[in-house]
Structure formats: structure tokens, C-alpha cells
Image: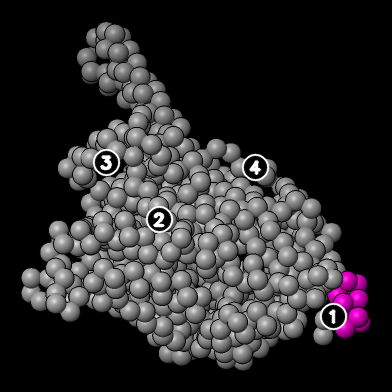
Amino acid sequence: MKTPTAPRRAVSARVVDPQPFFRIVMTGFATLIICAMAASLAFAEERVIKSHGFTEFGELKYPEGFAHFDYVNPEAPKGGELSLSAVGTFDSMNPYTRKGRGGAMSADHFESLMIGSYDEPGSYYGLLAESLEYPESQDWVIFNMRPEARFSDGTPVTAEDVVFSHNLLLEQGLQSYAEAVKKRIPKAEVLGPHRVKFYFSPDFPRRAMITQVGGTSVFSKAWFEADPENRRLDEPRLDPGIGSGPYVLESADVNQRIVYKRNPDYWGNDVNVNVGRHNYDRIRIEYFGDSVAAMEGFKAGVYTMRPENSSKSWATAYGFDAVKEGDVVKGEFPDGNVPAASGFVMNLLRPKLQDPRVREAIQLAYNFEWTNDSLQYGLFAQRHSFWQDSALEAKGLPKGRELEVLQNLGDQIDPALLTIEPVMAHSSKPARPADRRNLRRAMKLLDEAGWAVGDDGLRRDAKGEVLKLEFLIDSPTIERIVQPYIANLRQMGVDAISNRVDFAQYTSRRREKDFDMITFAYPKYLQPSTGLYQQFGSDAHEFSVFNPAGMADPAVDTLIGAIVKAEDQEELYANVRALDRVLRAKRFMVPTWYLDVNWVAYWNFYEQPETLPLFDLGLRDVWWVNAEKEAALKSSGALR
């Protein structure tokens, strides 16, 4: 803005009053000052934060320039092999394919701009990025990448690769992912060779936007564009492509084994977030046709580390000599994570399952107490909440901010939710599989829902359609659990069956939502955010593999939106508790069991840091091999 000049003098000699000139000049100065103050305020409002990491709430634990994470051994020896098992099959080393099944750990080739900390929920630090910049509004984020980062073929990882990867996932990735991300992240832009910017839509809350883009896998643009017809993200292939991670594929023998080897030229060995990690020279995964064969393989030393998820195996299968002699360690480690919300999920897209009375009746047929005592050796606890044993679990009558949140939902919810305790998993008598009291309640509910018992003992609706229920399963362990449950349902007049299919068919039918009920575990976190849209949101409910129930409910959508908008922990907790309460009242899932520890059996040559992190044991990247112990086991004949 120009400062006004004095008016020209008239030709005739007359005296000019200085006051108008003074007023004009002062008005100009005042305008300049006001503009400057406004610009200053705008700048203050849009103060740009530059950091080495990011956290949703509070402060980062690790300061800029930290040497390494507290939970690693920075002097851990490098070498040896980690060997694990997988049950089932694979036909692709492309983990993003929409067809077939990707091989174990096939996504680990690819790194992201940031990685999470194992001892600090909701906090992320730079990996491919050395820093990030964002305004307080979080309308956008800029990542400053490490110029030294390289793909395994030696080519640099650049901002072009980041933007290409983002767009490729939108074009060829899972439909549910692509549709959600397109709405929230409208643009990714290359600002320089190692500087990339993401813009966030004004129509959506900012929470988890930065971590979303910071955690996206980065692919080599040059590799994909060299053969675009045969190198699609959505097609199966045994060539995984090139990534920038510490391991590369050594071999893949379909349905037999996969071997990864350390990349000797890995660019990131000395980056602080990697110090003390990635300690094995090789990682081998042996494939088995079923869990019984896998257990026998571990006993024989075919593979040497086994995270255990079977209570039967944990209780009965570890009596072999190697355990008794201390050659195999049976370890239990604390788990600070929210237990996965596991159970039998009903497909709400099926008309027969849309009546809540039918769903409650199906729940009542399951006997957790008998199942746990008789089939699971009493090792589990019964799950009630989607955020079990955490500060996010809804308990008692709603009060305080949680009550206000529920009241604000108005007629979107049953008003009874405001005055009752949250739905709890029903209790059953453990003496026998069928609890007659619960079965009577269940049959009454089915009668009320219009499913009457016919002369043949089967229930039919007014149109004469039989109430059929298929449990789609792919595991003999689950089949063993399901059979007594099915027997109870059949006593109620439900034509219930279990259908165990091969892994490829199971994957295909699950993706197509071609099932009545399946077993599923919703991952749950201490700081839930946009991932809830995929698990329970309406937008992609008809096809999202992350929302197997096909949940679509306005109250749920409203609560997810409030969770994502939460600006402090108190608001987050209140809305998550309200969501927990609403989800439990929907009765679309039969809650089963959970553990608060991790079971891991391993041959006694693996070692770990003195203090393991609560939120990830780091079996694949924090532990290491003691070569002397391994040699001793082999020389003794205990391990081949």
C-alpha cells in the first residue's frame, strides 16, 4: 500500500492548511499498522510447527536427536536367523493384491515416512522423513525426507515416489481404503526432490490425517512404470518389486516357505529409529497345512519361534523334552495394548440378521464359560467391551461428558441407553454346553421376531423361509469351538451349519461379504481415530473388508466423527465410551475371549532387551540371536 502524497499546490500563491495533509498521512500510517497487526495475528494463528515426530495429544517422549529407543539394545549383535511359521497358503508376494493371498511379511519391503514407537501409543518418529512441518490447524503437512534414503536397487527415494505411491494406492488399492482417503486427502504435491506436501480436506477433522500419510508405504515409481501392465498393485505376482526396507526377498517357494535376507547396503542402519533393530541376517517363514503340523514342526526345530494363539496348544502341547530340559522357553509377556475385539460377527447385510432380537438370540446360544473351561483350559477371560480393560471401556450408567454425548444423539439411539448400564456378554452355566435358561430366552426372542417353529422343528418366517445360519471358517481350531455352539442353535430350531473352506475361498467370500457369520478380530487402539470409519462407518459398509458386519448406523457415524474431531483426551474418551456403549447395544457380534499377555515359545538361543516395550514385543526386529547358544543346541543334537 502506498502512503498518500501531499496535494499539489495551486498555481496561485495561497497558503495550504497543513491539517488535512496531517490527517491523511496519519490515516495512512494507521491503516498500515492495522494491516501489519492483522498479518501478524494471521501468522500467529497459522504458526508452522517443525518437528522430528508427531503425537496426537501431549508431548513426544523422545527429544530431537535422540540416540535410540529405550527398549532396544543398541549393542545387540547382528546375525543368525529368525524362523517362524504360517498356516495356510499364499500365491503372491504382492501384499496389496485384490486377488489371492499375499505371502507373510511381504509388506515389510516397503518403508514409510514415519514409524510408531513401541513404548508410546500414538507417537510417531521420522524414518524416510527426517522432519515434518504443519500449521496448528493441520490443514496440510510437509515432510522433509532424508536425502540418503535408497531403494534396494540403490536408487534414491524421492518425493516423486511418495506422491506416486499415494496415488497408486488410490487408483489400484482396496476400494474401501481408496474411497475413504480420496475424500480426506485431495492432493499430494512434490515441492522438491526430497520435500513433499499433503493437503487435507476442510470437510473432515484433522486427527490422524498426518499419521495416515506418514504411515503410507512408499514404492519405487521407476519400478512400476518400467512395466505398468505386469506391475499392477491390485494383481498377484511373485516379484515383490523393490522397497527401501532392511530386508529383501531371497526366495519364495509357493505354499512352502519364504526367506528374506538382510540388505547389506540398507541405507538406514544408523538412523536413530533403527539403532538396535533389524538384528537378524535372515528371516524364514515355513508354511504348514494346519496348526497340528505347525506345532510338530516347532517341536522338531523346523522353525524356532512360535507366538502362540491356541489355548489348547499352550496348555497341552509343550510337554516335550526340549521344554523340560530348558532348550525351549515358554514365555508369557505383558501386553499393554487394548485386546482385539474378537468374536463371531454377523453380516448385517443379510435380511434375516437385521432384527436385533434375532441377533440377541444368536448371542445367547454361545456358552463362553463351558467353552473356556472344557475346550480352552480356563486360560481366557470373557470379553464384554470393544475397548476391554482400558480407560475407553464404557462402564456403569453413563454420566458426565459421556452422558452429554449420548443425549446429543437424540433420536438416533434408543433412549434407554441413557439410563441403563452397557450391554454385557451374557453369563452361562459351565456344567454343560447348553444353558437351558439362555436357550429359553433365545427361543422367546425368535418367536417375537416372527420365526415360528414348524412341524420339522425348524424355524420359518411368515414367507416360509427357514432360518439358516452358516458359519464360514478356515481353521480347525475355530471349527472345534463352533460345533457345540451350532448344536445349541439347532436346539433352538435354527438350521445352523459350519462350512470350513480352503484359505483362498475363505478370503474371496469374506471380501465379497458372502457369509452369514465369521470369526473376526477388530484391532483396537488407545487413541482410536479415522480407522473407525473403515471398521464401523457407513460409507463403505457394503464392501469394506475391515467392516465385516456391514455396520451402517447414523449414531455410529456421528460418534466416529466426534472421536476424530477430539482435541483433548477427555473429549476422546467420552466419545469412545459412548461408541462402545452403542456398538454393544447393536448385538452384531458374539463377544468371545481375550488375553492380557502374549504367549511366545522359542528355542533358547534368542535374547531380548531387559525391558520389553508394552505395546509390541519386537520379536522380528528388537530380539537377536545368541550365536554361542545356538551352536551349543546344535552340537548337543537338541536342534538340527
* Residue type marked 1: Ala
Which residue is found at the position 51% from the left and 88% from the top?
91
Mark 4 = which residue?
Answer: 61
For the residue marked with disc 2, what is the amino acid? Ser
Residue at disc 2, secondary structure: loop
164 versus 93 height, above or below: above
Q: Residue at x 88, y 83 (%)?
A: 637
Tell which circle, 4 or 1, labels the residue nearer the N-terminal end: 4
Question: In the displayed structure, would residue 137 be above or below residue 107?
Answer: above
Pair 2/3: label in front? 2
| Magenta region | 628-638
**C-beta proximity under 8 Å, tags 1 and 3:** no
Quadrant position of the C terminus in the picture: bottom right
* Disc 1 residue crowd, few under 14, some 14–19, many 20+, Cα 10 Å: some
Give the mark nearest the N terminus, 4 or 2. 4
Q: Measured from the top left, where is residue 206 in percent x and y? A: 40, 47
**For residue 117, side relative to residue 26 (left or right):** right
Residue in the picture at 65% in, 63% down: 599
Q: Amino acid at mark 4?
A: Lys
Which residue lies under the disc numbered 1?
638
The secondary element bearing badge 3 is classed as helix
The residue type indicated by label 3 comes to Leu
* Residue 231 position in % (x across, y down): 47, 86
State the image coordinates of residue 388 (x, y, percent, origin top left): 47, 49
Q: Which residue is mark 2?
A: 428
Q: Residue at x 19, y 62 (%)?
A: 446
